[in-house]
Amino acid sequence: MLRNVTTGNAYSDGEERRGWFVGSFISPSISPRSSSTVEVKWGVHKEGDRRSEWTEPAETTTLSVLISGRFCLQFPDGEMMLATQGDYALWLPGIAHCWRAEADSVVLTVRW
């Protein structure tokens, strides 16, 4: 048993929260994955999945990194296709977005 190290599975730990497995929405009494400074999501999206309505502009900086698949991020002034493993988009606070999965995709998203 490792002391002071938390292990788990991003996919299963985030199932109850649409993929978010680190963040302020996790009770500190339950897990050290609770954080008021960073949120992390393991997003698994089937081809054709989409968020067609704009998000509320977040008060955080957001980074989305493509693990696998093909994933389109849409912003008020254009869109970004994440098509090669490791492609990413980073946007500043106050930017709304929506998205669509062009193929089965896995996307790691971090907000701070």
Image (cartoon, rainbow, N blue to C red):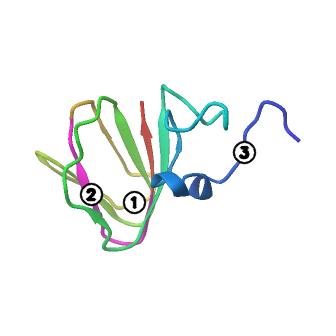
Above or below, comparing residue 51 to residue 47 in the picture: above
Q: Is residue 29 left or right of residue 34?
A: right
Q: Nearer the viewer, mark 1 or mark 2?
A: 2
Q: Position of residue 79 (x, y in %)?
A: 19, 53
Residue 104 included in the magenta stretch of the image? yes
Of the residues under marks 3 and 2, which one precedes in the sequence? 3
Residue 47 is situated, as x and y percent measured from the top left of the image, at 36, 74
Query: Does 61 appear in magenta?
Result: no
Return the residue at label 1: 84
Q: Are marks 1 and 2 in contact (CB under 8 Å)?
A: no
In the image, residue 69 above or below residue 55: below
Which image quarter: residue 96?
Answer: top left
**Amino acid tagged 1:** Thr
User: Mark 2: which amino acid?
Assistant: Trp
Q: Position of residue 40 (x, y in %)?
A: 49, 42
What residue is shown with label 3?
7
**Magenta highlight range:** 95-106
Q: Nearer the viewer, residue 64 or 42?
A: 42
Residue that appears at 36% across and 72% down: 103
Q: Position of residue 10 (x, y in %)?
A: 59, 52
Residue, x 59% and y 35% (percent of image)?
A: 27
Mark sitting on residue 99? 2
Give yes or no for contact between labels 3 and 1 (Cβ–Cβ under 8 Å): no
The one nearer the camera, 86 or 62, is 62
Which secondary structure, mark 2? strand
Quadrant occupied by the N terminus: top right
The count of marks equals: 3
Q: Amino acid at mark 3?
A: Thr
